[in-house]
Image: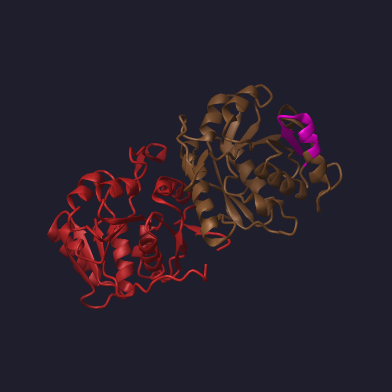
Chain colours: A red, B brown
């Protein structure tokens, strides 16, 4: 692990599509706390602005670090994370093809259904949310990552370290390295390369298992890769 | 985690269908080393007998602990692990419906395809190998577990501890508890409940990601669940 060097991403700005949802807000908070300029995006520009103002007031966030607007505004960042609900994912991603052109786009969406027995994976025609995004964004460098991070832990200012590994998938080795390095900006996290996008579906779906674990054991489960 | 007590399974005998394959042999060795009576099963009774004799001669295995025969012989154990190749899985399991009746059956099969880009998950009509087994064995108590254990680590007598978590899935809480306890018989391992069988497919498929990790980082990767 130590022998594979990662790029310096400390100056990278991060945009979050769906930055007003739990997962998006949590990630935004952690990246802002790590010193990254963060652009919160939302369907409604005013909700994006409001969420940014809230985040800017949280412990450890330097003034001017977090700004907000609509999802198009978030696309102005160097790297853009897709953290929208699965319902509507394809439509939103397709609508942003132009502003996302040439960018590293990180999909962290988990296509899950819920019923009385809890969560279960939805069948996705393209194989995974990430593959759907890649199909809709042929001019972007699409990776998949940040599926298993607990929004509750991310958003809790008292939590200093988030101890888990982020599985990063993608075809573009340079983009994958940037995402791995970005994960490592959050204390306790490592970014681990875990295969090509055709192997993203099970990583997304594994979130259903983590939810089952959380329910049984009353925890905020993540995963660590052993022997690394 | 510590507050959920597991049954004492130290007297349980373990049968392994496909006990001559890498994963089956590795598990057989670890359970024999932990003091369990182990029955190795194979398509060919003589190959089952030969594999048992080899395992019996390995360090840490007490005399008389490992015996072998055909797959029907392995079904005579208290708990039976299915470690056969995915190709032919359904046929074999269906043929053993009678001898597996009433037993706890643990499926650890990973339905993967391989091409020039490495492994990828195969689509399974029933959703997963474990669900296929459950459909074919209506009178058995089918669980899924032991997907991510490295055969190389299991089979290496110099490895004292196998540091990873075994995700255990199933509908039958008592059976799941037995399998969790069985995993914990191997030093370093924990058995963690990770949902119902409908969430087994992604756990099986995640093996493709671990293979990708092994290739990139030159390791024998497994997973640990954090916050437990």
Determine if residue A211 is in view: no
Task: Say above or below: B21 vs A35.
Answer: above
Where in the figure is residue A122, as x and y percent of width and height?
Answer: 36, 39
Where in the figure is residue A209, as x and y percent of width and height?
Answer: 46, 46
Task: Say above or below: A91 vs A20.
Answer: above
Residue drawn at (72%, 55%) of the image: B156
Residue placed furthest toward the front: B116
Where in the figure is residue B11, as x and y percent of width and height?
Answer: 76, 42
Residue drawn at (42%, 51%) of the image: A196
Q: How many marks?
A: 0
Quarter holding the N terminus of chain B? Answer: bottom right
Q: Which is nearer the eye, A135 or A158?
A: A135
Residue placed furthest toward the right: B63
Decide whether residue B16 is among the magenta residues: no
Residue placed furthest toward the bottom: A63
Task: Say above or below: A133 vs A24.
Answer: above
Q: Is residue B168 left or right of residue A119?
A: right
Where in the figure is residue A47, as x and y percent of width and height?
Answer: 16, 59
Magenta region:
B37-50
Q: Which is nearer the eye, A24 or A142?
A: A142
Q: Is residue A46 left or right of residue A127?
A: left
**Image quarter for residue B73?**
top right
Decide whether residue B48 is among the magenta residues: yes
Q: Is residue A63 left or right of residue B4?
A: left
Determine if residue B35 is in view: yes
């Amino acid at each position: 692990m130590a022998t594979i060097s990662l790029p310096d991403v400390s100056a990278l700005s991060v945009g979050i599509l769906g930055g007003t949802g739990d997962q998006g807000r949590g990630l935004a908070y952690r990246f802002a706390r790590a010193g990254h300029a963060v652009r919160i995006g939302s369907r409604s520009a005013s909700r994006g602005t409001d969420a940014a103002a809230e985040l800017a007031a949280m412990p450890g966030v330097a003034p001017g670090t977090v700004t907000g607007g609509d999802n198009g505004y978030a696309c102005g960042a160097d790297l853009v994370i897709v953290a929208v609900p699965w319902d509507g994912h394809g439509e939103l991603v397709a609508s942003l093809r132009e502003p996302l052109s040439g960018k590293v786009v990180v999909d962290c969406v988990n296509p899950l259904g819920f019923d009385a027995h809890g969560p279960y994976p939805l069948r996705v025609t393209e194989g995974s949310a990430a593959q759907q995004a890649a199909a809709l964004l042929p001019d972007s460098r699409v990776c998949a990552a940040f599926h298993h991070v607990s929004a509750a832990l991310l958003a809790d200012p008292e939590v200093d370290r988030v101890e888990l590994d982020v599985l990063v998938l993608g075809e573009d080795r340079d983009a994958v390295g940037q995402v791995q390095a970005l994960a490592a900006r959050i204390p306790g996290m490592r970014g681990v390369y875990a295969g090509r996008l055709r192997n993203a579906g099970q990583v997304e779906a594994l979130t259903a298992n983590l939810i089952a674990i959380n329910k049984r054991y009353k925890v905020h489960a993540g995963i660590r890769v052993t022997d690394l």
